[in-house]
Image (spheres, helix red, strand yellow):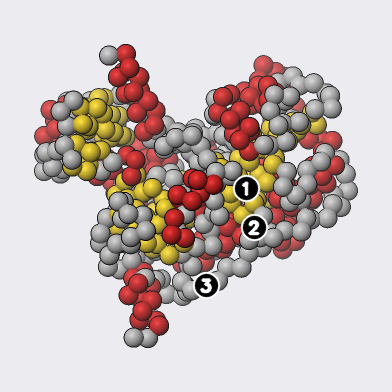
Amino acid sequence: MAIQDTEQAAWPWLKSYPAGIDWHTDYPGRPIHELMLNAASAHGDKPCLDFMGRGWSYREVGDLVRRAATGLAAHGVTKGTRVALLLPNSPTYVVCYFAVTMIGGTVVNLNPLYTAGEIRHLVEDSGAEVLVTLDVKQLYVLAAPLLGTTSLRKIVVQRMADILPPVKSVLYPVFKRGDIAPWPRDARHADFRDLVANSGNVAPASIDPERDVAVLQYTGGTTGVPKGAMLTHRNLWANTQQCLTWLQQMPGAIQRVLCVLPFFHVFAMTGAMNIGLACGAELLLMPRFTIDDLFALIKRKRPTYLPGVPTLYTAIYNHPKAKSVDLSSIRICVSGGASLPLEVKTKFEAATGCKLMEGYGLSETSPVLTINPLDAARSGSAGLPVPGTIIEIASTEDSLKLLAQGERGEICARGPQVMPGYWHKPDETAHAMAGGRFHTGDVGYLDADGYLFIVDRIKDVIIASGYKIYPRLVEEALYQHPKVAQAIVIGVPDPYRGQTVKAVVQPRAGETIAEDELRDFLKDKVSAIERPHFIEFRASLPMTPIGKPDKKALLAEEAGKAKTS
């Protein structure tokens, strides 16, 4: 058998690959900061960032990156120094991300919506020495207590007024005085104004893309304590290039990127920021999401590319304004961060006319592993492996045993975007990388054409009377009901069956659903053992900061009830 035939038997996705894309493409590593500096050199006066109506060109951003790198180096940031970014989507985030990596430091992404205790844990675990934030009270109060009580020795403060358009910059200190955090002008603080007041002549660090860690990306913690995925320069560079190769299916589509998802999340970091900059696109930055602000930005800037999570697309097509807002400029929408229910995809495309592509990935994989082809998407699938990526299915009982096509097991991945391991966690690293492949913790299978289908998280699987029940399949059935807006399915303790199924459902605005109505609806869609034993209706469901249904919060609620009962 020829080598090509052998490959095709082992890797069925090769026969399904889009024309003009070579799965065998090699992606040698480069320092990730070169992505920004190369773009600044190539695109000069082209618009790079739009923040609340104020714009920066590629040349201006490149200059700020060099000057911020010079200022951070003067404050002791050197190769290996961890620098935490406690920032919303803003010019400061983009500048500091590339400035830190330029001088060999490691970015530690912090979620501004985390609690003080969660922020403290990440700073302590990472050993971050410097933190960059805004003079916004709700952010600064999270950072200040960490000085002197953790490894943190310096806080760099960006004044919000300094990054606003001229009129807003003048009005902000007057009308938002209560939102501005007072901070001491002492040796433990640095004003971002002063940080960038230099010639920007620092020399980039000598980077080994294969080994040097560019970003510590903490896992979401939905299944336990967050772990720091060590993403190397090559991981991030390769995944950006893999995605760009895939998006060649629609040339010129990435001109203006609607950056709704926060950059501290790995999907937005690669899928919006890095991809957008590599294309010389304009990044339209939203520091916080509201549907009205989103529609206003779409009207003002006419974006062409929108990466988002399923709940974002649900919010758009459910909104009364959706049919009156012109969305025709958007050529590609990519869904990630959570499983995309088929009903959401169908209804969004019908309501907007936009093409919605589903992808799959994790913090540990920079993040993209698979994406559906633009013109050959397979219903319910997460798509085909991006170039250079191998997807394998391992037994959930024996992690070293690989399963045949069509068999359900744990999704595993190999490729240049896969992390080398977890920060200071050798045991967890050995477990996750068993057999030389990354074990995702997700259950799925490959079909005969190499398309990946995700069934559920291994830890979310409900076991009732010995039967495995996959919550995602029950959620998919619930989404088919025309009155259901959101649904989360979890397992709750059951004295007889061990666990049983509970569904928490959010009806569409203005709708009510009777419990019996929903039970009758599910009768021909899921088996008797899969049907929810308990159904709870809520006006809204708990969500993670990037808009994913927060299953962890509901499980914690159930655990609390069990303790008090």
Report which quarter residue 206 is drawn in.
bottom right
Q: Residues within 10 Å of mark 2 (few under 14, many from 20)?
A: some
Percent position (x, y) of residue 322?
Answer: 39, 40
Q: Residues within 10 Å of mark 3 (few under 14, many from 20)?
A: some
- Provide residue 74's location: percent of width, then percent of height: 85, 42
The residues bearing labels 3 and 1 have C-alpha atoms spaced at a distance of 24 Å
Mark 3 and mark 1 lie on one chain; the one further toward the N terminus is 3
Q: Earlier in the sequence, mark 3 or mark 2?
A: 3
Q: Amino acid at mark 2?
A: Arg
Q: Residue at x 58, y 57 (%)?
A: 235
Observer-side mark, 3 or 2, equals: 2
Residue drawn at 72 percent across, 31 percent down:
152
Q: Residue at x 17, y 32 (%)?
A: 497
Residue 225 x, y percent position in the rendering: 49, 34
- Element under disc 3: loop
Q: Which residue is mark 2?
A: 211
Side of 138 where 19 appears, left or right: left
Q: Quadrant of residue 8?
A: bottom left
What is the spatial separation of the Cα atoms under label 3 and label 2, in whole angstroms? 21 Å
| Towards the viewer: 172 or 279 | 279
The kind of residue on which mark 3 rests is Thr
Relative to 409, is 297 above or below? above
Query: Please, is residue 14 above or below residue 512 in the view?
Result: below
Looking at the image, residue 323 lies above or below residue 538: below
Kindly identify which numbered label has been placed on residue 215: 1
Tell which of 353 and 545 is nearer to you: 545
Q: Determine which of the numbered discs, if any, sits on residue 25 in the image.
A: 3
Please identify the quadrant where the C terminus is shown: top left
Identify the residue shown where x is 66% and y is 60%. 209
